[in-house]
Image (cartoon, rainbow, N blue to C red):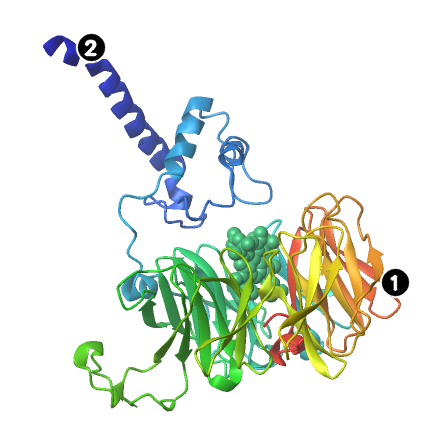
Amino acid sequence: MKTLLLFLLPFIWTSTNASQGTHEIYLQHCAQCHGPDRLGAAGPALLPQNLKRLKKKNAAEVIANGRQATQMEGFGSKLNSQQIQALVDYIYTPLKNMPVWELAQIKASQIIHHKTGSLPDKPRFQADIDNLFMVVELGDHHATLLDGDSFDPIHRLPTRFAVHGGPKWAQGGRYIYFLSRDGWVSKFDVFNLVWTAEVRAGINARNLAVSHDGRYVMVANYLPHTLVLLDAKDLSPIKVIEAKDSNGNSSRVSAVYTADPRNSFIAAMKDIPEVWEINYADEPPRGFGKWVHDYRPDSGDETKAERFPIRRLKLKGILDDFFLTQDYEKIVGSTRGGGAQVVDLDLGRAVAAVNLPGLPHLSSAITWPRNGTTVLATPNIRKPEVTVVDTATWKVIKRIPTQGPGFFMRSHEKTPYAWTDVFFGPNKDLMHVIDKQTLEIVKTLKPAPGKTSAHVEFTKDGKYALVSIWDMDGAIVVYDASTLEEVKRIPMKKPSGKYNVHNKLTRSAGTSH
Ligand code: DHE
């Protein structure tokens, strides 16, 4: 026994020493930017949940050579390849304890750059505010404010690392709210071209929604499993809602959207078969008791209710991705394992099934009137087709073959065409233009051969369509939406989404909400 221990001792010693060494290397070289606890600081969080989109091989490359157009320097001259590999393994190892990120931590992270009401109420530039675009440039973590009439950039602003989902416009275009995958919510004052407030609402976040009256911001998180309600004025946290079912099973939150006429946020759960409606009206909605401050959920007293009450819709399957109808009465969600279901928000249950087996990207679906009915069209992530569904019968009326699976789809009330990208596969540089009445592809554009072209947004009058060339040496290409001819090219660094004030705030049926 003694001999065995003596034999094993060097191995035990080396492995302990190696892991201690890695932690020390991390503290010495990484902690200053990424936080001693790996929860992120100036740099992003280094946790497996936050790194899902980065392959380990690429992580080693970034540690060795740095990341272009960011403050991440290369450590190839300071660390050998074993040390780099050990660091990669270290950052892809889950934390032993789930980080606590509750009201206190969120509050402590709040940064006020400019106090509410301290800045002038007049824009510092000349432009039609209603026709402004905000373009997110993923390439070097910036965003560009673009004049939607002249297509001239007005201002370029640095964002937090890895903004995801649409930034949300509010107050007629005065403010816009961004969310980073690391959970940072940042409020930008467009008139004064400055950030006014920031707060970290989660460790790994999905998206945010702003109430239609501009008073509240709601953030959906993967880590921790929470929805976080913020005061839109200065991003002070109001409430942290744990995402779990009545049996205590907790869930990541896939996404949250605003349902304007319902005065509520609609949130989809990723791990439990539920969709939640969280009401933000000042008065309790029908069916809920009177609001009280000392409400106790276990009291069983139904005459009283907590502010921002939650209605839990129990579904048959988990929804992966969903679309809210223009009247906010129904949601159409893709069900894990295939297909889609239509859920009536008032009835609180599924009312139809839709034959959509190609993993439809429903958060990108759009609708338009056709032959006396409203059709819904969605790209599919796993199938080279755009599927068109009649929303009166929920039957598929057309499957339009495309040159590869797509991600985003767009139109506008004043254009006869719907645009969809080919995001995946060898034809990722193509963009299809579909006639909304014949449901045929009328033209396929190739704005930059060999480079992904994706995500379209229209000017407020629907006359021009803006396409992203998703590349470090990329651009926004402006097309005349009726002749389909190029009119301008604005260089940008891997531009992803772009968001027009008018189309977003009027909840145009041709764009995501
Ligand atoms: Fe997104 C929006 C989920 C990967 C770019 N994406 C959204 C929304 C959801 C979502 C729920 C709607 C939120 C909103 O706008 O408020 N995205 C997911 C995923 O589950 C998925 C497939 C995997 C993931 O890692 O999260 C995913 N998304 C991507 C990308 O790889 C993209 C192409 C590049 C990136 O930024 O990471 C990407 N997603 C976008 C964009 C929007 C978006 C540009 C906003 C679209 C819009 O016009 O509103």
Q: 142 or 299, which lies in front? A: 299
Q: Which of the image's four quarters has the N terminus?
A: top left
Residue 379, compared with residue 68, is above or below; it is below
Q: Position of residue 13 (x, y in %)?
A: 23, 19
In the image, taking residue 391 as reference, residue 170 lies left or right, namely left
In front: label 2 or label 1: 2
Q: Give the number of the disc on residue 485.
A: 1
Residue 218 in the image: state x and y as whole percent.
43, 71
Residue 141 is at least partly visible in this image: no
Name the quadrant containing residue 173. Answer: bottom right
Q: Which quadrant is home to the C terminus?
A: bottom right
Report the Cα–Cα distance between label 2 and label 1.
76 Å
Disc 2, SS: helix
Question: In this orientation, does residue 253 appear?
Answer: yes
Asked if disc 2 is less than 8 Å from ligand 1, the answer is: no
Which residue is label 2 attached to? 7
Above or below: residue 449 compared with residue 353:
above
| Amino acid found under the numbered disc labelled 1 | Glu
> Which type of secondary structure does the marked residue at label 1 adopt?
loop
Q: Are marks 2 and 1 in contact (CB under 8 Å)?
A: no
Q: Residue at x 61, y 64 (%)?
A: 355
For residue 338, above or below residue 511: above
Q: Nearer the viewer, residue 418 or 141?
A: 418
For the residue marked with disc 2, what is the amino acid? Phe
Q: Residue at x 38, y 91 (%)?
A: 286
